[in-house]
Amino acid sequence: MKNKSIDWNVVWMEMMQANRKADHQDRGNCATLWDSRENAERFWNRSQENRGRIEKTLNELHLKEDSRVLDIGAGPGSLAIPLSEKVGHVTAVEPGKGMMELLQENISNSGISNIGCVNKRWEDLDVEKDLEGPYDVVIASFSLGMPDIKDAIEKMQRVCSGHINLYWFAGETPWEEHSTNLWPAMYGKEYSPGPKCNVLYNLLYSMGIYPDMHIFPLEFVNSFGSMDEAFDYFSSRYTIDTEQQEVVLRNYLEDTLEEQDGKFVDRGQSIRVKVWWDQGAMD
């Protein structure tokens, strides 16, 4: 029996709106954040230091040599590039300008010819004009920052003839912990975290989708060569309008980051979740 008493898509929308409301420049918007080439390169370098996690993710997917894969929120190609070595075709959807620029460079440098790129937000994309479906596998790895998640999932369903794989957060992320600590002093209000996997699961259930779920821990490590480098990175993810806000952020980083081998390290733990189902069996 479907639970119709709560509209879980509205719950998701309201939590997403509250999460972004304090940042009037919308720097918390994922696409805006990853317009920065510097942020994209930092993300890529960090992903290459955790190749074991990437390989584990690939091994969890239902891949064949001739599979057609859709990677939503592909970033600089952390998954798309190794995926291309295992399957027939990959379509990489990535809205961030810096991420897309780096993705295309990585594709060129690797001599890959079976990845197609779409530089659009998933919610702005036309599945008929922009994609080459149907796809045997759809993956959205920590890229579900869409305001209307139900519409986003329905769009995935329309182009998938096999498995849909969503990766998201089950608990507080290291970044949310930072924001919870910083928001009152920087903006004079409490921080509102984004929706987690409980909202996602309940939405899927209300849509008649009964997915498998796998919970796993993941360590987050981000290293900086100097405190100024750390400040530049953190300030790209916040709105810094006043000198006082800058002071608050600098003091926080000095108190929080670990000094290790001449670097300043941001380290945290989070609980993540993989949610997946066989769309082909539902159609």
Image (cartoon, helix red, strand yellow):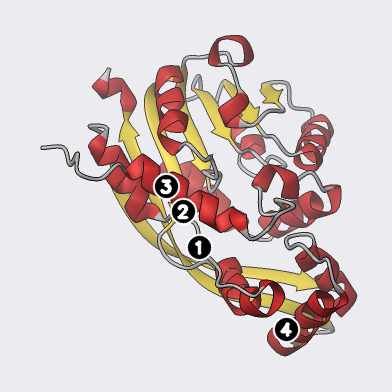
**11 versus 88 height, above or below:** below
Amino acid type for the residue under numbered disc 3: Trp
Amino acid type for the residue under numbered disc 4: Tyr
Please identify the quadrant where the N terminus is shown: top left
> In this view of the protein, which residue sits in the foreground, 27 or 52?
27
Amino acid type for the residue under numbered disc 2: Met
Q: Position of residue 279 (x, y in %)?
A: 32, 26
Which of discs 2 and 4 lies nearer the camera? The answer is 2
* Res. 12 mark: 3
- Residue at 82% from the left image edge and 30% from the top image edge: 108
* Res. 252 mark: 4
Amino acid type for the residue under numbered disc 1: Pro
Q: Label 1, on which residue?
A: 193
Q: CA distance from mark 2 to mark 1?
A: 7 Å
Q: Position of residue 82 (x, y in %)?
A: 63, 38
| Residue contact between numbered discs 2 and 1, judged by CB atoms under 8 Å | yes
Q: CA distance from mark 2 to mark 3?
A: 5 Å
Q: Label 2, on which residue?
A: 15
Q: CA distance from mark 1 to mark 4?
A: 19 Å
